[in-house]
Amino acid sequence: MITALRTYADTRHLGAVWDSSTGFWMENLNCRAPDISFVRKERLRGLKRREARFFQGAPDLAVEILSPSNTRREVDERLNDFFSSGAKLAWIIDPDRELVEICHAPTQRRLLGPGGSLDGEDLLPGFQYPVADLFKEWEW
């Protein structure tokens, strides 16, 4: 999915997409590095790098991919950090259940199953990605 997001954002000059090697300093001074992050081009000019690869504030879109060891509390803490620091949208991907949680705030969340599509909404207008494609087996 990161390739699809990056290609979509780059070809339309919407902003930048990064992997988990890019960190963001939250308002509470936690450093978070979502598995995938997107920042609109309008915000890129205003974001300040404290040091290489770390930005002040949350990405506009934060994507987290759950591992079996993640707890609900950890996810809630991440969402609270993201949204209190400026995030507009978060996608929490649960590979075990093959679901995605679409979050507009820590308490405004809904589940999306394999029949649905991720929607870039106002951040990535027109971007659609089938949830089922997130969980496809590699075909070699």
Image: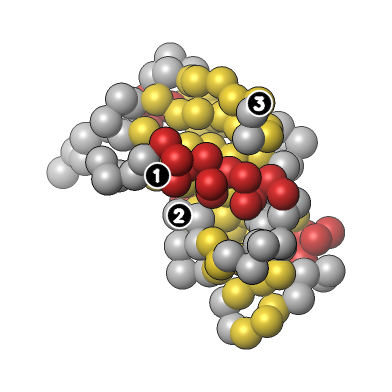
Residue 42, can we see it?
A: yes
The residue that disc 3 covers is: 108
- Element assignment for label 1: strand
Coordinates of residue 140 in the picture (x, y in percent): 16, 44
Which circle's residue, 1 or 3, is located before the other in the chain?
1
- Element assignment for label 2: loop
Q: Which mark is residue 84?
A: none
- Count neighbours of disc 3 (C-alpha within 10 A) and say few if under 14, some if 14 to 19, many if 20 or more: few
Q: Nearer the viewer, mark 1 or mark 3?
A: 3
Colour setup of the view:
secondary structure
Query: Which quarter of the picture shows residue 104?
Result: top right
> Mark 3 and mark 2 in contact (Cβ < 8 Å)?
no
Q: Is residue 8 left or right of residue 67?
A: right
Give the farthest residue toward the top.
115
Q: Amino acid at mark 3?
A: Gln
The residue that disc 2 covers is: 35
> Mark 1 and mark 2 in contact (Cβ < 8 Å)?
yes
Q: Is residue 136 left or right of residue 81?
A: left
Determine whether 84 is above or below 76 in the image. Answer: below
The residue at the point 34 percent across, 44 percent down is 70
Cα distance between the residues tagged 2 and 1: 7 Å
Coordinates of residue 58 in the picture (x, y in percent): 67, 57
Q: Amino acid at mark 1?
A: Ile
Residue 7, can we see it?
A: no
- Count neighbours of disc 2 (C-alpha within 10 A) and say few if under 14, some if 14 to 19, many if 20 or more: some
Along the line of sight, the residue nearer the viewer: 134 or 86: 86
Coordinates of residue 42 in the picture (x, y in percent): 83, 59
Which circle's residue, 2 or 3, is located before the other in the chain?
2
The residue that disc 1 covers is: 65
Coordinates of residue 46 in the picture (x, y in percent): 83, 69
